[in-house]
Amino acid sequence: MSETFILEARALRKYFPTGASKMLQRPTDLVRAVDDVSFGLRRGSTLAIVGESGCGKTTLGRLLARLIEPTAGSVVLDGVDLTAASARELLELRRDIQLVFQDPYACLNPRHSIGQSIGTPIRIQKTLDKAAEKARVRELMELVGLNPEHYNRFPHEFSGGQRQRAGIARALALQPKVIIADEPVSALDVSIQSQILNLMEDLQTSLGLSYVFVAHDLSVVRHIADEVAVMYLGKIVEIGDPESVYGRTAHPYTKALLSAVPVADPRRAAGRQRIVLTGDVPSPVNPPSGCRFRTRCPKAAERCAAEEPVLSARSGDQPSGHRVACHFPE
Amino acid sequence: MTLLSVQDLHVTFGTADGAVRAVQGVSFDVEPGETVAIVGESGSGKSVTANSLLRLNFGADVRIDGRILLEGRDILAMDETQIRSVRGREVAMIFQDPLTALNPFYTVGHQIAEAFAIHHPGTPKRELRKIALESLNKVGIPEPSKRIDQYPHEFSGGMRQRIVIAIALVNSPKLLIADEPTTALDVTVQAQILELIAQMQAEHGSAVILITHDLGVVAEITERVMVMYAGRVVESASVADTFLTPTHPYTRGLLKSVKSLDAGRHERLESIPGIPPSLINLPSGCPFHPRCAYAESLGGRCETETPALHLVGSSRSACHLPDERLLGLLGGGV
Amino acid sequence: MIFFVLRRSIFGILLLLIISAFTFWIFSALPSDPAALTCGKNCRPEVIEANRERLGYDKPLIEQYGSYMKGIFTGRTYGEEGAAVHCPAPSLGYSYDRHECVTSLIASTLPVTASIALGAFVLWMAIGVGLGTLAALKRGKWQDRVATAFSVIGVSLPTFFLGLIFIMVFVIWTGILPFPRYVGLTDNPFEWFMALILPWLVLAIISAATYVRMTRNGILEVMNEEFVRLGLAKGLPRRRLIVRYVLRAALVPIVTIAGLDFAFLLGGALVTESIFNMPGLGKLTLAAVVNSDLPILVATTMVAAVFIVVANTVVDILYGYLDPRVRVK
């Protein structure tokens, strides 16, 4: 099984201490941002992780690239345990897994030229000399649709979409195997989003990249994902290929999420039955016992409070295919 | 009588790099009780237009020309006292980011009461508190008597947006301007807020101008749409017409760019090539022509002549293409 | 809230202990020999040694420190039988140079420094915040430029320079104000006031300069905040918007910094007091430096430290009171 996965998360947990005790100001609580998450990313494919704010998807993205250390569990990159790697091993391993971030305005050093920014990973890893670096950067710029002649221009001279292209170019500089993209198009205009998504798809095909795509926009995810994982309060509640998750939705939360997405078609919008969830997302500090979604779930029963559901396939489904963590899946 | 009539609005900002022509000749009407959407991407001028309706473009070096008639009275010609009586009472506004929209130093009860007290001076404190409580209740804040004395930072994003809505509606305004009210919120909260706005609108009978870039939101709750691009209105039509028979290449491009929940896996996304223009150095003629797939078929007209908004079927469009072609935009290719 | 105050207070006391120990140690590490200072210029080495033993300067440092700290609580006797002097608690030492208990020296000079500091504080806040607000509201116009110019000039002027200029202009040339000397408030309020005008002005102008800048920038920053725009959209009159929304937000950090600056000034404005002939803590300290009067130096340093530590605690509490987001639950 592991040979087919380029990236694997195994029982990942990340807890953040929080709160302050009265006298000594010691942390009193734990924010269970990521609580026992496991999945495998197949070579050359895209896994999308969706959820709302506070579900832990951003933390998960950072754990996968080992930007932060897990509280428990491990991340395996192409057979190598990333989380157990030493500092020196890690430096080399980082060439294989890169990140693209959400805010194109905050991700580029305003004092560096675009060419310098894109070439930064090369300089850090010392893989090429200066001339070769420049050539590579120009090559990358062309690859992502930027004009190589703009090498010396500064970020503020580019639009949001162009800056995001630069971010992608930078991520590609070291020829990674995996790219973790954390909401890469959320901050962009609708028409530019499509451009960037198309670009990412093209690059995936031509360079054989594998993506972990963290997003909150379910429609964006539908287009680019080969597998979708829905997160809620630190756990994966449903995972499977997009046709199953969107078309034969199993988890009540996913159902509510999908029904909440506004549809750009007035004919359908009029007659839609929307499931509006009541209340706010509970605090990740004290998640509800048993199933974390039960406080907002229209199907909640006694069993839901007592027993935490495990991610498993519904009867009739493939055991390694579409799985859901619910006692009463649809 | 038409509630709001914007006539030939021009807004220009003076900056170090030159004059930014944010809005150029925008005109539209809003009838009482209507829900109108102004759609556009960044740089389209939609937010600037919205802010101009209440003359909120303060501080910067701004020049506003044109007329904004609220039930016949020109907002741009009003003096300080007059416009202050309009703001928050006849016309209210809600903003995009609920995290920064509320004053962090005062309780939410105080802020709601303040909105009422400004326009009803002399109201006794007890009365004000009652009104604030009722407001919180109406917008669905649980345990209002406890939360009325809490500060904004003690609420979640969705709750704060409800409070902002409560503030806006406390005086039953005739017009509510919502500037990207759900963009910063999670999709499930977004659904709640949109429902709330629709509900409140029905209750108060207010007209709503909804500024957004999300076409899905537009389809869900609005009746009429105005599409803006680079400071101009390029299309104005009913929601059904806009989505089913768009009459402007930009609208078509936007619709095609929308990602759908029932797309196929790895389905190629259509996009509009290029990037929005700089508002300092606008293209000559039609601002969209550098990115328009149809510009070539019209020779050089798009570059030299700025199209005016004219009737095409039951929509209004600012495009030089002949009517038959405009009405068939979605159907055929270029 | 109680826990917050308690925690900060304990921390403050701990800090003071550390500061006092450090101060004590540093002064003992100085080249001047305290024993040698006890008996004037033509001192015989035997007398110095005898004094050293008598006054306890030969004891280990920790013991000296211990006795010193104890003296703060119980009072201490300096010297021996016939020439013994008892300084009641809190005893901060004994100045052999002046033949006085340090505590009473400080007690007599502190009111002078406090008068100067308080008046200057009120004046500089009024000028600083006032001009800063004006500059922000009239950004780009002449009021803004004048205020900014004032700010730049004020910050660049050394205290003694401004002080001397003022004396020249107001006392010598025009005779509007009396020659600088201190008059107790209780003795003659009017003269007390007149005598303090110049020192107040000098300190205020120099301090205000920074506050003009800070206030101006703070206000401009806040004015861009979304909640201010919402306030405007509610129909708030301009003045209320400025006071309740803009100033309320912008002044919080400024008030807290001002508290710290005030505490600093309480430690004694050395130059100002010297120029204007005010017998305050600063002048006392300066004289002690010149005469190597270590007991006074140790004491004034610690007193200044106390003010700063207390001010820090007060300011922290104040900040929590002013900004609900920071408030301890």
Image (cartoon, rainbow, N blue to C red):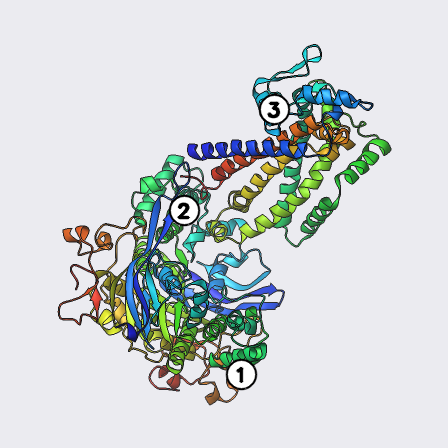
Of residues C242 and B49, the one drawn nearer to the viewer in this rendering = C242
Q: Quadrant of residue A130?
A: bottom right
What numbered label is drawn on residue C68?
3
Q: Are marks 2 and 1 on the same chain?
A: yes
What numbered label is drawn on residue B152?
2
Amino acid type at circle 2 is Pro
Say above or below: C117 vs B167: above
What numbered label is drawn on residue A237?
none
Amino acid type at circle 1 is Glu
Residue C172: x, y in percent? 85, 32
The chain under label 2 reads B
| Foreground: disc 3 or disc 1 | 3
Find out whether the residues at labels 2 and 3 contact each other: C-beta distance under 8 Å: no
Say above or below: A151 vs C242: below
Q: Are marks 2 and 3 on the same chain?
A: no
Left of B215 or right of it: where is C44? right
Q: Quadrant of residue C298?
A: top right
* Mark 3–mark 1 distance (CA, rounded to whole Å): 89 Å
Report which residue position mark 1 lands on: B303
Q: Are marks 3 and 1 on the same chain?
A: no
Left of C27 or right of it: where is B150? left
Disc 3: CA contacts within 10 A as few (<14), some (14-19) or many (>=20) = some
Say above or below: C185 vs A233: above
Disc 1: CA contacts within 10 A as few (<14), some (14-19) or many (>=20) = some
Q: Earlier in the sequence, mark 2 or mark 1?
A: 2
Quadrant where the C terminus of chain C lies? Answer: top left
Left of B147 or right of it: where is A102? right
